[in-house]
Amino acid sequence: MKVSLLVLFLLLHAPYCLSQSLGIRGDALEKPCAQQPLDCDDIYAQGYRTDGVYLIYPSGPSVPVPVFCDMSTEEGKWTVFQKRFNGSVSFFRGWNDYKLGFGRADGEYWLGLQNLHLLTLKQKYELRVDLEDFENNTAYAKYTEFSISPNAINAEEDGYALYVTGFVDGGAGDSLSYHSGQKFSTFDQDQDQFVQNCAALSSGAFWFRKCHFANLNGFYLGGP
């Protein structure tokens, strides 16, 4: 499948917050029952049902992070941590960019390894991978559990290692189980188990175990 759309989502099934705010999209501090939402599940719990950019706080109350929330796919609550669809943003980047994140939440972007680690450290998540080609054909894959260096004292020193289990095939194939347990690699931080630098060879970055490039183009996260 020739991919034109690549996105990653994160979903948390949290208790519904009965008190709804009026300004979560522009000012998350107006949220009355949870001062800073951790993810799009918290924002959904406020009553928001529109796809778009919201603020989340995986690092705490002083560090807002813009993120795209998909409130419609499979009942919504998805926090998008990667979105690619037109090639406007280069994903051939170094370690610091992948650690901290890059791009814009209203376009193509990567949320950042540190943010992903903090999210999956605080809650349990499910991953969903979605692909769409130029003829609008779609496919997906799901993993019932997803986390980044869940047992590490220092996630960066641990390489932001990937952990996934519970593959469910929606036509996209299983592109992640083989790489589970592997550290993240970029062209300037080669942590794969191959003689060559897989990130450099692929002009990208990933949790490469070996240089397998097929079906590495879309992911979705979700909570059990």
Image (tube, rainbow, N blue to C red):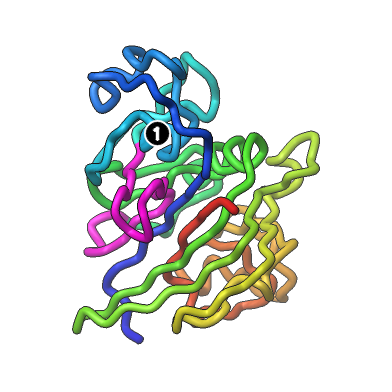
The stretch of residues the image draws in magenta is 67-89
Q: Is residue 90 above or below residue 216?
A: above
Q: Amino acid at mark 1?
A: Ala
Q: Quadrant of residue 89?
A: bottom left
Q: Is residue 129 above or below residue 151?
A: below
Q: What is the x, y in percent for residue 8?
A: 42, 57
Give the percent coordinates (x, y) of residue 54.
31, 33
| Image point (24%, 49%), residue name | 107
* x and y percentages locating residue 31 in the rendered image: 36, 17
- The answer to whether residue 11 is magenta is no
Residue at point 40% right, 33% down? 45
Left or right? Give the position of 30 relative to 202.
left
Q: Residue 222, percent across and down?
A: 52, 54
As drawn, which residue projects farthest toward the front? 18
Q: In this orientation, which residue lies closer to the viewer: 21 or 143?
A: 21
Q: Nearer the viewer, residue 184 or 147?
A: 147
Provide the residue designation for mark 1: 45
Q: Residue furthest left?
A: 135
Image quarter where the N terminus lies is: bottom left
Residue for point 65% across, 58% down:
145
Residue 187, above or below 2: above
